[in-house]
Image (cartoon, rainbow, N blue to C red):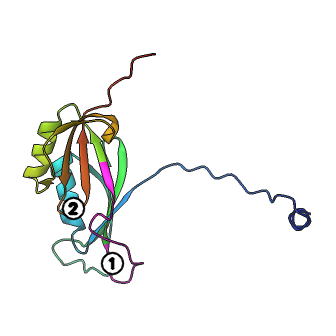
């Protein structure tokens, strides 16, 4: 009967989909996922909550080849993954993705990211628009991703 309604111009009922999480996946050149995870831990205090290893990696090798790691960062989950040879092509080196972190201490956060291997892209400034306004520092990590490190958004006065 549903098929008849669609054929006669009726709308087909589609089951509602409820998403339970959004997990940005940062793709890095293989085999740099381990290094990237260490950078995000050092620079931003990320916590590794899980990972998957390459199934063809031999057990006797010193370090497992991590394919993907799941990190908790500022209340969000991100995935850091190696780009493997036979995977679907993905543009690497950041690819236009900008990540925003909020902190009360922008200067210290930028300095910590730079000491871990990031590159400050600009001086810390007061900006409207970026990360909802406030103090903003811009750091490019060793894997090409740009991080805006911002002070929390200012509360607007009631009009």
Q: Position of residue 4 (x, y in %)?
A: 91, 66
93 within the magenta span: yes
Residue 78, image x and y in percent?
Answer: 35, 54
Tell me whether circle 2 and circle 1 mark residues in contact (CB < 8 Å).
no
Would you say residue 52 is visible in this rendering?
A: yes
Q: Secondary structure at mark 1?
A: loop
Question: On the rendered structure, is 8 left or right of 76?
Answer: right
Above or below 154: residue 30 = below
Q: Find numbered disc 2 in the image and state the secondary structure of the residue it sits on.
A: helix
> In the picture shown, does residue 101 fall above or below 48?
above
Q: Main secondary structure of the magenta part?
A: loop
Disc on the earlier residue, 2 or 1: 2
Magenta region includes residue 43: no
Q: Nearer the viewer, residue 86 or 58?
A: 86
Magenta span: 83-99
Mark 2 lies on residue? 36
Q: Is residue 70 above or below residue 33?
A: above
* Quadrant location of the N terminus in the rendered image: bottom right
For residue 133, above or below residue 144: above
When asked about the image quadrant of residue 91, the answer is: bottom left
The residue to which callout 1 is attached is 84
């Amino acid at each position: 009967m549903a098929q008849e309604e669609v054929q006669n111009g009726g709308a087909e009922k589609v089951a509602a989909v409820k998403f339970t999480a959004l997990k940005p996946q940062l793709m890095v050149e293989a085999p740099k996922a381990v290094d990237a995870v260490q950078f995000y831990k050092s620079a931003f205090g990320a916590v590794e909550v899980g990972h998957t290893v390459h199934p063809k990696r031999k057990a006797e090798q010193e370090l497992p080849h991590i394919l993907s790691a799941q990190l908790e960062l500022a209340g969000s989950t991100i995935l850091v993954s190696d780009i493997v040879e036979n995977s679907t092509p993905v543009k690497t080196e950041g690819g236009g993705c900008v990540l925003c972190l909020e902190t009360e201490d922008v200067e210290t956060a930028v300095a910590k990211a730079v000491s871990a291997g990031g590159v400050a892209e600009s001086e810390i400034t007061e900006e409207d628009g970026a990360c909802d306004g406030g103090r903003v520092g811009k750091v490019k990590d060793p894997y090409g991703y740009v991080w805006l490190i911002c002070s929390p958004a200012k509360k607007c006065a009631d009009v």
